[in-house]
């Protein structure tokens, strides 16, 4: 994706880059909040929804998923979480500092949304870091798409698959959404595997309309490179930044 001068000239860009650089991927997991809603969780027993993604860039599908999950599962706060170190992906496309700028501008008019960056990519590491920020007994639910859900159960990420998965699911839940390539039935069929059935009770579902489920950041980036319109696929603040 092409460089955008609007990021580099923004007064907060260098501040965010410095903060990101300070996150040590070899130290204990840490999350820095760059925007915390005034309605943030401050007492025990509340429900935090964490949407950990690349947001490269933020799309209307991301927003629809957040809105549906928040309403359906009565989430008290939503944390949009970027990661300095992703398990599967290198950082490419929009700079992380630029993504923070976009997410923060979007969150300003949505008082239930906070924005953060994690030093680590694994979910269990994110939970560890979140526990240092949020009150005791905060319920954590990660909002994910089908493709991400499948990766959670990939043995290549673990030394002891089921021991580590049981530890993860004892700390949090997952809210899984359909994607273009997989509907809710496909998700349930995937989880019906004998070795995975013990985790089904920790996974909830959100059904996105087809016209949202087919939207991807990859397609948005392609459209930008080829000079095609993106205003119907991203929030106005994203279109403005990337114009």
Image (tube, grey):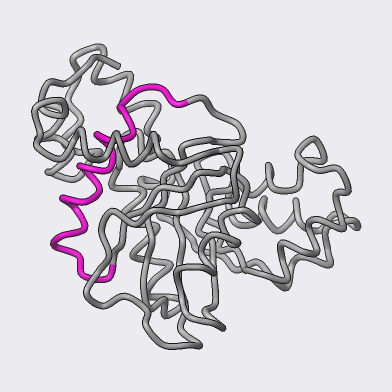
The N terminus sits in image quarter: top left
The magenta stretch spans residue 208: no
* Quarter occupied by residue 173: bottom right
Q: Residue at x 53, y 49 (%)?
A: 145
Q: Is residue 64 left or right of residue 49?
A: left
Q: At 61% from the left edge and 36% from the top edge, which residue is drawn?
A: 87
Q: Is residue 10 above or below residue 166?
A: above
Identified at 67% across, 50% down, the residue is: 186
Q: Position of residue 21 (x, y in %)?
A: 39, 34
**In the figure, is residue 98 to the left or right of 92?**
left
Q: Which residues are magenta?
A: 91-112
- The mark total stands at 0
Question: Where's the C terminus, which quadrant?
Answer: top left
Front position in the image: 241 or 211 = 241
Q: Choose between 19 and 166: the one closer to the eye.
A: 19
Give residue 37's position: percent from left, percent from top. Answer: 25, 69
Residue 113, how many percent across, how many down?
29, 64
Left or right? Give the position of 16 relative to 211.
Answer: left
Across and down, in percent, residue 237 comes to 13, 43
**Picture quadrant of residue 181:** top right
């Amino acid at each position: 994706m092409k460089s955008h001068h609007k990021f580099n000239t923004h007064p907060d860009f260098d501040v965010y880059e410095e903060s990101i650089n300070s996150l040590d991927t070899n130290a204990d997991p840490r999350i820095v909040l760059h925007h915390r809603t005034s309605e943030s969780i401050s007492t025990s027993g509340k429900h935090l929804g964490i949407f950990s993604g690349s947001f490269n860039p933020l799309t209307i599908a991301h927003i629809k998923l957040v809105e549906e999950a928040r309403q359906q599962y009565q989430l008290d706060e939503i944390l949009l979480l970027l990661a300095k170190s992703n398990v599967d992906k290198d950082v490419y496309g929009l700079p992380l500092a630029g993504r923070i700028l976009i997410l923060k501008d979007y969150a300003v008019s949505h008082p239930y949304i906070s924005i953060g960056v994690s030093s680590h990519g694994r979910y269990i590491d994110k939970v560890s870091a979140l526990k240092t920020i949020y009150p005791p007994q905060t319920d954590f639910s990660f909002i994910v798409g089908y493709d991400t859900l499948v990766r959670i159960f990939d043995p290549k990420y673990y030394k002891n698959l089921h021991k580590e998965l049981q530890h993860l699911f004892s700390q949090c839940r997952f809210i899984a959404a359909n994607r273009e390539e997989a509907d809710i039935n496909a998700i349930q069929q995937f989880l019906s595997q004998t070795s995975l059935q013990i985790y089904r009770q920790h996974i909830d579902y959100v059904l996105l309309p087809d016209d949202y489920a087919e939207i991807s950041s990859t397609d948005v980036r392609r459209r930008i490179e080829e000079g095609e319109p993106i205003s119907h696929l991203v929030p106005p603040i994203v279109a403005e930044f990337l114009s």
